[in-house]
């Protein structure tokens, strides 16, 4: 391998999205756990719990999307 | 009796025909790794607009967005062409979709639903139709071949009828500078598809996000007037602060933060939809490249779900932000 031409932008992009997805992944897991617990306790409220769970997941997911943006910028721009 | 028999024969014929076509496609088409291009590719070369001097080009996502508009407008035209009090056929379907959505939105926005509904439902339906249309066969797989500057793929002739040439890309990678046995330089090609999923273009999602956030501000200003401005520039808090109510002065710090969060909405709206759809396209392309037959099916199903989910989320969040923007301060307490 030509050491002088070693290009690690792919590695950087991979790390950016990989590490960036870690937190939101845990967050979404916690959110779903809480929602499942709630539905188990009170099945009648499943509808509104689901809507609110999706809302929470969307905000957690937004963090992963910022990481995706950074990864895309590193890789393509 | 003979009609049932001919029906069966027709069905059998269709099944056999589909199987034959599928076998032909499996045998004759290779699936190279798709060229992952962040920006939408131009189908016609960019030409400057005479007066403005700006480059104008028709991209494949633009054509796909026109197609999805045609589908939506055509459907609503056909459904409302002769409206009856007792609906039937397409009108029935349209009423079912609109009424179900309206009921659901009413649970969040209450009496203000009717004002927000046109915006929210248009965004939802358009994103849904364009996301699902982007999964149809032909999107991202049919196009013209472009000579690659870097790594490309060998093209082979599939069909030749007069001036029409049909090519198919093979799996054979052509690096630049490789020569064939006659000493000519070999050319690799990449595919520039005619159609591409609309939401995999940031311009589309950004435009939708700007429309959504702008309309939220318009609704907020129309309903609350100066009270809405007070959220961001808390001039009322100055008087509270002078009057010795220090806690009310907190609004001075919260106001600018609210302003920033309005701008952040545009970013998260646009990149959420773009990121999900673009990642889905890449995922499907890579899966089809790795194992071309049957294995990518579950991922295809996942993409159908993600497409519907993101359309729902876009519409739902727009509705939610509009509702909070028009709520009076401290209404909930």
Image: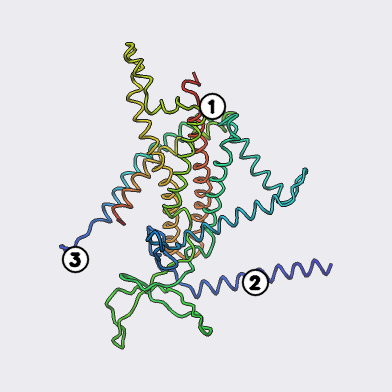
- Label 3 secondary element: loop
* Residue that badge 3 annotates: A1
Specify the quadrant of the image occupied by residue B261: top left
Q: Which chain carries label 1?
A: A
- Label 1 secondary element: helix
State the residue in front, B123 or A43: B123
Tell me the distance, in whole angstroms, between the alpha carbons under discs 3 and 1.
60 Å
Q: Mark 2 lies on which chain?
A: B
Percent x, y of residue B110: 59, 29
Q: Do labels 1 and 2 share a chain?
A: no
* Residue that badge 1 annotates: A41
Instruction: Judge whether B327 appears above or below B125 on screen.
Output: above
| Residue for point 41% across, 60% down | B40
| Residue for point 80% across, 66% down | B4
Percent x, y of residue A34: 46, 31
Instruction: Judge whether B87 appears above or below B176 on screen.
Output: above
Task: Answer few, some or many: residues within 10 Å of disc 1's Cα (few below 14, many 20 plus, some between 14 and 19).
Answer: few
Tell me the distance, in whole angstroms, between the alpha carbons under discs 1 and 2.
52 Å
Percent x, y of residue B264: 38, 39
* Residue that badge 2 annotates: B16
Q: Name which of mark 3 and mark 1 comes first in the sequence.
A: 3
State which mark lies toward you, 3 or 1: 3
Residue placed furthest toward the bottom? B182
């Amino acid at each position: 391998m030509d050491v002088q031409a070693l290009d690690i932008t792919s590695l950087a992009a991979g790390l950016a999205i990989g590490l960036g997805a870690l937190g939101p992944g845990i967050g979404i897991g916690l959110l779903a756990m809480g929602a499942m617990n709630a539905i188990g306790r009170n099945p009648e409220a499943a509808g509104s719990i689901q809507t609110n769970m999706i809302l929470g997941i969307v905000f957690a997911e937004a963090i992963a999307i910022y990481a995706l943006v950074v990864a895309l910028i590193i890789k393509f721009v | 009796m003979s009609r049932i028999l001919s029906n069966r024969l027709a069905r059998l014929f269709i099944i056999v025909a589909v199987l034959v076509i599928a076998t032909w496609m499996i045998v004759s088409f290779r699936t190279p790794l798709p060229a992952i291009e962040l920006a939408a590719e131009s189908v016609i070369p960019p030409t400057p607009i005479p007066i403005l001097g700006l480059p104008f080009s028709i991209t494949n996502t633009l054509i796909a967005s026109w197609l999805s508009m045609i589908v939506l407008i055509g459907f609503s035209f056909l459904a409302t062409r002769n409206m009856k009090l007792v609906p039937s056929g397409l009108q029935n379907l349209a009423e079912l979709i609109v009424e179900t959505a309206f009921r659901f939105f009413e649970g969040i926005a209450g009496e203000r639903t009717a004002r927000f509904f046109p915006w929210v439902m248009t965004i939802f339906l358009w994103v849904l139709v364009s996301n699902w249309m982007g999964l149809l066969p032909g999107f991202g797989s049919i196009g013209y071949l472009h000579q690659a500057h870097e790594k490309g793929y060998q093209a082979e002739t599939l069909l030749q009828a007069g001036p029409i040439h049909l090519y198919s890309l093979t799996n054979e990678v052509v690096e630049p500078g490789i020569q064939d046995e006659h000493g000519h330089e070999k050319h690799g090609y990449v595919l520039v598809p005619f159609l591409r999923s609309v939401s995999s273009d940031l311009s589309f999602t950004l435009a939708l996000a700007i429309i959504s956030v702008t309309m939220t501000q318009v609704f907020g200003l129309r309903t609350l007037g100066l009270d809405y401005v007070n959220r961001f520039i808390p001039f009322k808090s100055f008087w509270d602060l002078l009057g010795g109510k220090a806690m009310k002065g907190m609004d001075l710090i919260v106001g600018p933060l609210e302003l920033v969060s309005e701008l952040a909405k545009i970013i998260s709206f646009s990149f959420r939809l773009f990121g999900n759809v673009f990642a889905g396209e890449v995922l499907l392309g890579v899966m089809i490249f790795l194992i071309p037959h049957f294995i990518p099916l579950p991922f295809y199903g996942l993409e159908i779900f993600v497409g519907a989910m993101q359309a729902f989320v876009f519409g739902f969040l727009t509705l939610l932000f509009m509702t909070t923007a028009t709520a009076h301060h401290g209404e909930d307490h």
